[in-house]
Amino acid sequence: MAQLFPKVANQIAKASIVLLGLLAGLVATGVMVLFPRSSMVTRQREAREQPVPFYHLHHAAGMGIDCRYCHTSVDKSATAGIPPTKTCMNCHSQIFNQSPTLEPVRASWRTNTSIPWVKVHDLPDFVYFNHSAHVNKGVGCTTCHGPVDKMAYMWQEKSLLMEWCLDCHRQPEQYLRPKSEVYSLSYRPPANQLALGRRLAAEYKVQTRTSCSTCHR
Amino acid sequence: MSQEHVPAVPVSFEGVRRRPDGQGPRRRFWKSLDELADTPAFLEFLHREFPEQASTFEDAKGRREFLTLMGASLALAGLTACTKQPEERILPYVRQPEGLVPGRPLFFASAYGPDGYARGILVESHEGRPTKVEGNPDHPTSLGATDVWGQAHVLELYDPDRSKTVLFDGQDRTWGDFRAALRDALAQQKGKQGAGLRILTGRLTSPTLIAQLQGLLSALPRAKWVSWEPVSRDNARAGAALAFGEPLEAHYHLDQADVVLSLEADFVSGHPASLRLLREFGARRQPSAERPQMNRLYVVEGAPSSTGASADHCLPLRSSAIEGFARALAAAVGVGAEGGASHASVAPLVADLKRAGARALVIVGESQPPAVHALAHAINEALGAVGTTVTYTAPAEALAPGGESAAFAELVAEMTAGRVELLAILGSNPAYAAPADLKFAEALDKVPLRVHHGLYLDETGERCHWHLPASHALESWGDLRAVDGTVSLVQPLIAPLHNTLGENELLAAFAESPEQKGYEILRAYWQAQPGEGDFDKRWNRWLHDGVVAGSALPPKAVKVGTGAWTRAPKAGAPAALELVFRPDPSVLDGRYANLGWLQELPKPLSKLTWENAAFMSPRTAERLGGIRTEAAGTGHYTDVVELRLNGRSVKAPAWILPGHADDAVSVHLGYGRRRSGQVGTGVGFDAFALRTSAAPWTAGGLELSKTGERVMVACTQDHWTIDNPEGEQAQERHIVRAVTLADLVKDPEAVRKLGAAPAVGLSMFPEYKYDGHAWGLSIDMSACVGCNACVIACQSENNIPVVGKEQVGRGREMHWIRVDRYYEGPPEAPQVYHQPLPCMHCEQAPCEVVCPVAATVHSDEGLNDMVYNRCVGTRYCSNNCPYKVRRFNFLLYQDWTTESFKMLRNPEVSVRSRGVMEKCTYCVQRIVRARIDARNEERPLRDGEIVTACGQACPTRAIVFGDLNDKQSRVAALHRSERRYALLEELQTRPRTTYLAAVRNPNPEWRSGQ
């Protein structure tokens, strides 16, 4: 019986072992690089169900309520502030005050227990982000949070990975907007964004720092 | 640890290794007798930052098991990167309190009284959780500083061992049950006008509580209230009564005093006005080229104290001999006093005091008998000091006639005689701390109904029928007077964590209004007091400021009379060996025994942690059979001795303390608690067991013998020692630089000339440029008194864990700032210097270049950042740090499970886990907060806007933080001072933390011999 495989098959077989190994290594590296950045891990653009079906779409776009009506401490504190039940009841004691959907809100009000909102933008505990430092220097809400007025349940628009933070901290002119437009949901960056950004960075004395202790301590 | 290898401890410079030129001992400044003698064990400590065995496994895990575990953890650790974060919830307020901005702390003024006298504080609150205590700058006895107990105040609040429920004979009951039982008992007492009712409290300064008790006593006139403290101030009160005919409080003004003599008065630690006195003292200890002046402090003491360590001349003299010294002094000053003992130091001392005249001051400690206090009052008057350096007022506390110790003894006698039917003990622990001769516990058992109200179920609580859990001062309304009489309102920062009542609420239950709330009681009392204007406005102002304006007691003009105290006392033969009692500098009389922060705080002089010991001088140790202590990799080992006094005995580890008076042994109270909590129970030995009501401070006739046993004690004095190399090329390193004021006046460059000027431009690394801020710290060794407030303030601010005695023994304590205590001179009577040592934040940091994962890097403002989430625990940085300031989490030191501790932590600082390196960050969270605030308000940062936790707590203002780029800043000015020097400058690290050399102001005429 003649040989089924030519002699070169030995070399191919040997090489394939090495190649397969290399391939496996490549795939593993790829997975290690890509997987932590994938939305499976970051939960980017994953709308998160909440104890109350609160829609920014309805409140921000439909009603035109300003971000700061609820997120009162965004320009004063590290945290933007999740509104107390009182803020909901300001309106909902009058409108939709019998709606079964809003029962958890009324229950919270009656029993004096917090509504357990699901944290959508959840940074690791060793990261200390400060909202006020950003909104006071021309970083708009939608720059990081995306088109909030288009979201029913809230999702996380950006990856919130450190490389994403550093992208702006290294070149803030890509994203800065006039302070008057910080809370605008309809603002679109102009064509000359880089020129505008550079001018605003100088005007607002923007100092984006990349030292570790800026955020980690 | 074989006995033969134990080296002899040097009792003097004889036999100590000399410098190559033969002039003096090899080390001018030394931290321990082991170092002075260069023992092999000390050298081990020196050369291995983490001593023997520290880097290997301690438990009996085999190699295979180790590999299995490591393999598994490696595999599992790799996977953690691929997990999603667990889902977290946000729980907002239902109704957000007015004025609260989420994420921003609020500060509320309050007060606490470790000894009954108020210290004003500002408490930091994060969304309703008190996390940190700062001093209240508007409070006259705080002035913005805190002591170690102030810092530990929040830890006490969250202590998981606090008692949580009402107990009757160990069974759970409700407050309703107690009120019903009390109603019945009081109904019985009513018929007898309260003849069988006794109330025992600690020292009370609270106007409201005193009014409540007086109200109760007027309703039941035959009932009695006794206030008593184990560490009493009876001697000072009796001394004033001898001199002036009334028990006055003396207030000292160290800012006015040029020459101060302290006869065992420890105003650094434990004096009710310490914080104010230290501010005034510190301000007079910082000479500069423009103002080359400072005060001069003499201390005569039988047991070394922090005050003696800060003195220009400290004379170790047996406690019992100080009266003779004082009498000789008084006679020389011109006060008609007899019975003086001649001493070579008296003449130069008197000359100096007389030169200062009205600006001289003599202070006497509580441990001295009343006659010595009276003599000091007379000396101060003769010097003309009354009105300048000392003033008098009525005491701030409610006083028992004849002294609280006498009143307490009478109470115990009544209890023993069976005349007490209902005893209520409020916030006091006599079953532990009462004098041994009174046999309090036996007397207590004879009382038919015993009620105990306290924070802990302690030795007293367990012997009482009812134990009632008390609210912490941070959970209840109250008021306190400072020692000068200033009233502060104590306001709660948080609702009671457990089912507890405050003291005023409990006393209300004894009166007619059993369910009254603490707030109503307090407000009603103050509303009834006379005052001008709208009460609500005044009330809010008091709460806001933390002081009731104008409530300080008015000064009294008094004259010293004459009396029997001027005549010589009956002279007994001096005892061969005497025992001296002192409150512990950390846990006081034991009330703070369950606070790990305080237990682990190295004591200012002995540097012992988790321990008290029988302290004695090197010579006495030699005389008493050659007591040996020895440093080893797992702690210090020392002889256990038995102390016998009047038929009572305790066993204690012996500890040799340089500068101790000979033929005396001193012990700290507050240890050997039989029932405290997980932390405090069974730590140390109980010195109260030897303390009698006749001899509460000094007892003659002590017998001491070695038991043959040796024990490990956790002492940090040899930890983190910086080496002084030997050899022909070696330079003296000048870690401590100390000069005299005269040297400094003669040559302003005296400090700089001590050390070799560092060569410039030798570094291979490029220079950093700082366009914005460049942070720096300055520590004044001349002002530092070693009080430890910085250490514990840092611990509180930065979520630093407690590691326990065994781990401290291995050199694994986690404090980010340590206070190195150095001795200079012979072990019999050395000078002492304290050197607080945080991270130096080097410009060319040796740690940064060796980190393989860039977990420690230079920031654009000059900080040496530590990034915990990057750290993989190689410990290379620590190995390469010449200052030995880095701390490694060898084990899981942080308590991640106790719920109440989660509320304690500063949310602005990461909580570190096992395997992570950590170190001082210059409180970067405070820098970031201030910088963001300033930039949001579009203004530059002001100098002094950022204070580090250590600097904020410091009573003498020895630690100053600021921007070196701002030439006008205080820290920049201090970095230009002629006293400035940097540690190990010759290594080219260029530290940002620099020191101001210690300056002492000795009297050239001083003679300390007999």
Image (cartoon, grey):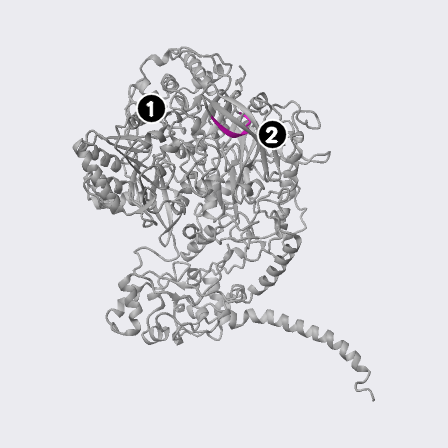
Q: Position of residue B451 (x, y in %)?
A: 29, 38
Residue marked by disc 1: B237
Chain under label 1?
Answer: B
Please say if B352 is above or below B821.
above
Q: Quadrant of residue B31?
A: top right
Quick one: label 1 or label 2, which is nearer the N terminus? 2
Foreground pick, B22 / B515: B515
In this orientation, does residue B601 appear? yes
Foreground pick, B628 / B169: B169
Please say if B894 is above or below B718.
below
Chain under label 2?
Answer: B
Amino acid of disc 2: Leu
- Prevailing secondary structure of the magenta residues: strand
Foreground pick, B506 / A61: B506
Q: Position of residue B687 (x, y in %)?
A: 45, 29
Q: Around disc 2, counting alpha carbons within 10 Å, would you say few (fewer than 14), some (14 to 19), or many (20 or more)?
A: many
In this orientation, does residue B844 appear? no
Q: Which mark is residue B33?
A: 2
Q: Around disc 1, counting alpha carbons within 10 Å, would you say few (fewer than 14), some (14 to 19), or many (20 or more)?
A: many
Quick check: B950 left or right of B31?
left
Tell me the CA gap for discs 1 and 2. 40 Å
Q: Is residue B436 in the magenta section?
A: no
